[in-house]
Image: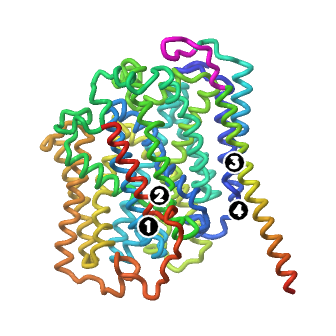
């Protein structure tokens, strides 16, 4: 049966088959609970915080996180941890402490809906359309990554792999909606942990200590987060402005604080406290995730000669799949492959469930067919799920033209998330921001990213690496959006203070009761401080 | 609604038992390089057992919560019957 790198045994296929049975079973079991569009698209707002927290984490745990971060680590070294310890954790704390109360209390069903309440319909429409495009573009990455892994490792036909995975995701999202997607994300979280942790354990056992691993790196900068940040001559080829401004602030905060894919998980929580704790609960395991993603990438540099040469499929993207093939016995190999498969399917399902909500509520219900029955919107939501998956299959083939999935993803984020974060910051914390200021600012920020990209393609702007280019592009897009928004806001009429109640920092809803006092140890603020302290310590430890 | 810990628990229990039994029945022929030495480490068995234990823990937690919910429902119905 060997046509790929590994001779899979029946036990490996059995593990995959049993996973498929459980995933489909969850979808069908939840089917009877899907009675309204709210149940299907918003999970009925009845999911406990530990489940939404893990789903919040896992929605981001698709192909990009698992394969992309390992690939980055193999290419740039431990500096990849900046995505976690400089970017994600502070952004998740900021979301929980400052932004989630506005999202949850304004009773919005989606992020674009907040923009309608805070600004106007055109701003919402611009964001809804760009988000719908972004999610289907991102969704395809997962299918592509899955197909390439199965082709190289097991010799499976790429088209057949794509078709099977798309059909399974379609089956469980169309039956169980967002709840099914969230449940499978939690299932996938544990599969990823159990499926990939042995790689790191075996790596440590083999080399004995972190110091022994560091001694094997040809480039000593691979073992340090900050030591070589004095110039662009570090493994990532990025300067301080790009790293701190681009990755640490704009891209990370833009993704974690405004991307509806992750916010949607928190909005499904049962109450405000659960919604605020969702990013906090996700952030604790997230701090340790480099053990599962970055560390294997570093091991791959040492253990897989020729990685990154692209000979015989030896691209950086294949760091984790290759490690599974050389380190795992049959049985455990099936589990590792199933963990990857789960992350790809879950990443795709996350994008599709965010797409169907934005399409149904923010585009279809708002502009195409208003005042229809709930059953009609439930039907449209299911139809959007199927269409989203079909488009994802199309965008999957688009990804094949990019040499790195990480480049493709960061490029998309610089166009959509970077300017959007400036719009949200001004919208939530600067009452003077006017509706038209927000609209033209968002448009200008997106256009600035496009112009910057075109100039980079024409080599009129040059960077040490594609990653450095993405970081700088995001800073440009964010800054242009901020400046244009503020300028136009002072030239146009802002919304009356009364209309901003519950939407802007410092302007509360009249008669709003103070939140019930609870233990300081379970408050998002205290947990956030603990998280930031832990993150600072890790930065010091691997300085 | 379905408690998510049940499918997680059962999946890990089934997969864990499968891995452990397979590893016991078909130990790998090649030894694993650990440090400077090769050891006959059969990873399927301990990892399978760990997964199965995790599965049992998840199922138990779900069952305990179910029992607690039934108990509080019973107490509530007894209290309302006493009032009437």
Q: Quadrant of residue A435?
A: bottom left
Which residue matches tag 3? Answer: B58
Front position among marks 3 and 4:
3
User: How far apart are the two marked residues, 3 and 4, measured between alpha carbons?
Assistant: 17 Å
Q: Is residue B41 located in the magenta-colored stretch of the structure?
A: yes
Which residue matches tag 1? Answer: A100
**On what subunit does the disc labeled 4 rest?**
B
Secondary element at tag 3 = helix
- For disc 2, the neighbor class at 10 Å (few under 14, some 14 to 19, many from 20) is many
- In the picture, the disc for residue B1 is 4
Front position among marks 1 and 4:
1
Percent across and percent down for residue A40 are: 60, 64
The answer to whether the residue labelled 1 contacts the one labelled 4, judged by CB atoms less than 8 Å apart, is: no
The range drawn in magenta is B32-44
User: How far apart are the two marked residues, 3 and 2, measured between alpha carbons?
Assistant: 23 Å
Q: Residue at coordinates 41% horizontally, 30% vertically from top-left? A: A297
Q: In the rendered view, how is the structure colored?
A: rainbow
Q: Is residue A390 visible?
A: no
């Amino acid at each position: 049966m060997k046509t790929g790198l590994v001779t899979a045994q029946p036990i490996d296929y059995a593990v995959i088959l049993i996973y498929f049975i459980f995933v489909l079973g969850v979808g069908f079991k939840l089917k009877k609970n899907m009675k309204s569009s709210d149940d299907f698209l918003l999970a009925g707002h009845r999911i406990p915080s530990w489940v939404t927290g893990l789903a919040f984490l896992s929605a981001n745990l698709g192909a990009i996180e698992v394969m992309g971060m390992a690939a980055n680590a193999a290419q740039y070294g431990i500096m990849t941890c900046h995505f976690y310890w400089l970017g994600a954790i502070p952004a998740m704390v900021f979301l929980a402490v400052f932004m989630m109360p506005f999202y949850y209390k304004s009773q919005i069903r989606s992020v674009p809906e907040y923009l309608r309440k805070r600004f106007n319909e055109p701003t919402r429409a611009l964001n809804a359309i760009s988000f719908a495009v972004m999610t289907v573009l991102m969704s395809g990455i997962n299918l592509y990554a899955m197909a390439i892994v199965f082709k190289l490792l097991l010799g499976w036909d790429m088209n057949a792999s794509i078709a099977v995975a798309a059909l399974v995701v379609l089956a469980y999202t169309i039956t169980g909606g967002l709840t099914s997607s969230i449940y499978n994300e939690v299932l996938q979280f544990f599969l990823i942990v159990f499926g990939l942790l042995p790689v790191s354990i075996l790596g440590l056992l083999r080399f004995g200590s972190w110091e022994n691993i560091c001694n094997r790196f040809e480039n000593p900068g691979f073992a340090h987060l900050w030591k070589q940040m004095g110039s662009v001559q570090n493994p990532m080829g990025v300067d301080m402005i790009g790293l701190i401004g681009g990755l640490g602030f704009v891209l990370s905060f833009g993704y974690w604080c405004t991307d509806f894919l992750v916010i949607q998980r928190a909005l499904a929580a049962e109450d405000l406290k659960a919604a605020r704790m969702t990013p906090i609960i996700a952030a604790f395991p997230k701090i340790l995730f480099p053990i599962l993603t970055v560390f294997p990438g570093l091991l791959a540099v040492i253990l897989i000669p020729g990685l990154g040469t692209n000979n015989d499929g030896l691209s950086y993207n294949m760091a984790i799949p290759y490690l599974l093939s050389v380190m795992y016995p049959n049985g455990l190999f099936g589990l590792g492959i199933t963990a990857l498969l789960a992350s790809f399917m879950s990443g795709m399902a996350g994008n599709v469930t965010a797409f169907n909500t934005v399409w149904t509520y923010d585009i279809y219900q708002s502009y195409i067919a208003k005042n229809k029955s709930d059953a009609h919107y439930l039907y449209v939501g299911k139809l959007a799920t199927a269409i989203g998956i079909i488009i994802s299959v199309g965008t999957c083939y688009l990804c094949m033209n990019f040499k790195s999935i990480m480049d493709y993803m960061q490029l998309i984020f610089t166009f959509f998330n970077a300017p959007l974060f400036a719009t949200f910051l001004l919208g939530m914390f600067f009452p003077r921001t006017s509706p038209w200021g927000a609209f033209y600012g968002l448009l200008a920020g997106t256009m600035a990213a496009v112009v910057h990209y075109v100039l980079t393609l024409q080599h009129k702007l040059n960077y040490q690496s594609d990653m450095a280019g993405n970081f700088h592009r995001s800073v440009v897009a964010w800054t242009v959006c901020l400046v244009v928004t503020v300028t136009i806001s002072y030239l146009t009429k802002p919304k009356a203070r009364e209309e901003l109640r519950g939407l802007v920092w410092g302007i509360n809803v009249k008669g709003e009761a103070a939140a019930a006092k609870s233990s300081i140890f379970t408050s998002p603020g205290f947990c956030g401080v603990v998280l930031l302290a832990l993150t600072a310590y890790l930065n010091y430890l691997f300085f | 609604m379905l408690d998510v810990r049940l499918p997680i628990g059962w999946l890990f229990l089934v997969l864990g038992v499968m891995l452990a039994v397979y590893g016991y029945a078909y130990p790998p022929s090649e030894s694993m390089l650990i440090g400077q030495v090769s050891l006959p480490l059969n990873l399927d068995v301990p990892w399978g057992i760990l997964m199965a234990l995790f599965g049992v823990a998840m199922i138990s937690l779900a069952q305990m919560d179910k029992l607690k919910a039934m108990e509080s429902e019973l107490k509530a119905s007894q209290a309302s019957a006493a009032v009437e």
